Image (cartoon, rainbow, N blue to C red):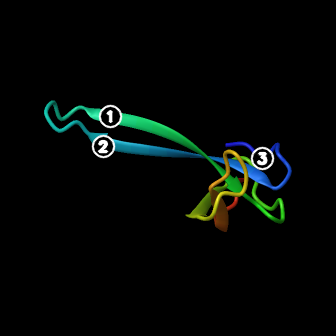
Amino acid sequence: MSDKGDKTIIVKVDVIKAHRKYKKVVRRTQKFHAHDEGNTAGVGDVVRIVESRPLSRLKRWRLAEIVEKAR
C-alpha cells in the first residue's frame, strides 16, 4: 500500500467472507506496518509478512518475501 517510510512498508490485508446469518459478502481491510530492511518492496507488490518483536510504536511485523512484483 505504501513504501514512503525508510525501511518501513504499510501492507493492506483484505478479508472477504460471508456473514454468518445473512450470507452477504463482508469485506474487512486491515493495515499493518512492517519492517523492510533493504527497502525492496514497492507499491502494488504482493508480499508475505511474519510477526516479530516490537520494532517501533507501530511495527510488529517484518517482510518475509516478495511474492509478486507490481507491473
Q: Earlier in the sequence, mark 3 or mark 1?
A: 3
Q: Name the residue that disc number 2 marks.
A: 17
**Depicted 57 relative to depicted 7: above or below:** above
Disc 2 is placed on an element classified as strand
Neighbour tally class for label 2: few under 14, some 14-19, many 20 plus, Cα within 10 Å: few
All told, the count of numbered labels is: 3
* Residue at (70, 45) in percent of width and height: 57
Q: What residue type is labelled 3?
A: Asp
Q: Are marks 3 and 1 in contact (CB under 8 Å)?
A: no
Asked where in the image residue 37 lies, by quadrant, the reply is bottom right
In three-dimensional space, the C-alpha distance between marks 1 and 2, rounded to whole angstroms, equals: 6 Å
**Depicted 23 relative to depicted 6: above or below:** above
Q: Name the residue that disc number 3 marks.
A: 3
Q: Earlier in the sequence, mark 1 or mark 2?
A: 2
In three-dimensional space, the C-alpha distance between marks 3 and 1, rounded to whole angstroms, equals: 28 Å
**The N terminus lies in which quarter of the figure?**
top right
Residue 63, percent from left and from top: 67, 63
24 left or right, relative to 45: left
* Residue at (73, 51) in percent of width and height: 56
Q: What residue type is labelled 1?
A: Val
Neighbour tally class for label 3: few under 14, some 14-19, many 20 plus, Cα within 10 Å: some
Picture disc at residue 26: 1
Disc 3 is placed on an element classified as loop
53 left or right, relative to 56: left
Residue 23, percent from left and from top: 18, 35
Q: What residue type is labelled 2?
A: Lys
